[in-house]
Amino acid sequence: MEHRLRDRMVLHGTVVIVIGLLAGFPHALVITGQLAGSERAWRMAHLEGVLNGLLVLVVAAVADRLVLSRRRHAVIAWSLIVAAYGNVVASILGAMWNVRGLNASPPGTNLVVYAIFFVAVVGVFLGLVLLAMSAARRSRVATAGPEAAL
């Protein structure tokens, strides 16, 4: 993976972690009773940011080991970045609006959260499937020799 793309993954993964950490403040306020809201929803928003950001950072860290074309590297990177932002933003909006976004049903705020989660789920699955394909290809090349890469 080219350095510029990996650097973008590190940047965006870090930003998503910071957003998740910031979501910890309303979570703490709900726990202490200083803010009305769902403790579960704010905990999820907090953890979504931290965990999704870490996923992007981990993939950036192993990017040099991926056996894929430049285009597929970009698809992995951007699908995971979009998924990370989508999950944390949808979780925060869901906590703020007191909706879960588990299905495409009214009210409109639930539909917005659902749509963002849907895009994020597609992104994370796309990125992880391509990552798994890369790992399988690398394993096949390692056991069969360089001629298997052709």
Image (tube, rainbow, N blue to C red):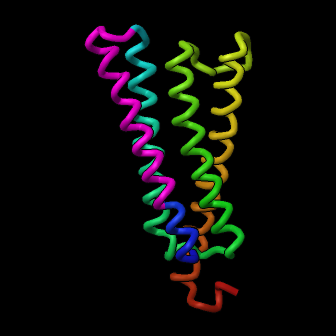
Q: Quadrant of the N terminus?
A: bottom right
Q: Foreground residue, 19 or 63?
A: 19
Relative image position of residue 38 (x, y in whole percent): 43, 13
In the image, is residue 76 above or below residue 118? below
In the image, is residue 134 above or below residue 126? below
Q: Quadrant of residue 22?
A: top left
Q: Please identify the dominant SS of the magenta region.
A: helix
Q: Is residue 16 within the magenta segment? A: yes
Residue at left offset 40%, top offset 30%:
23
Q: Quadrant of the C terminus?
A: bottom right
Q: Foreground residue, 137 or 16?
A: 16
Instruction: Say left or right for 38 vs 29.
Output: right
Relative image position of residue 11 (x, y in whole percent): 48, 58
Q: Is residue 145 within the magenta segment? A: no
Residue at left offset 63%, top offset 40%:
120
Range drawn in magenta = 10-35
Instruction: Say left or right for 44 vs 133.
Output: left
Relative image position of residue 107 (x, y in whole percent): 70, 10
Residue at left offset 56%, top offset 73%:
4
Residue at left offset 63%, top offset 39%:
121
Q: Residue furthest left?
A: 32
Relative image position of residue 109 (x, y in whole percent): 66, 17
Q: Foreground residue, 51 or 67?
A: 51
Instruction: Say left or right for 2 vs 22.
Output: right
In the image, is residue 129 above or below residue 69? above
Residue 124 appearing in the image: yes
Q: Quadrant of residue 30?
A: top left
Q: Foreground residue, 26 or 81?
A: 26
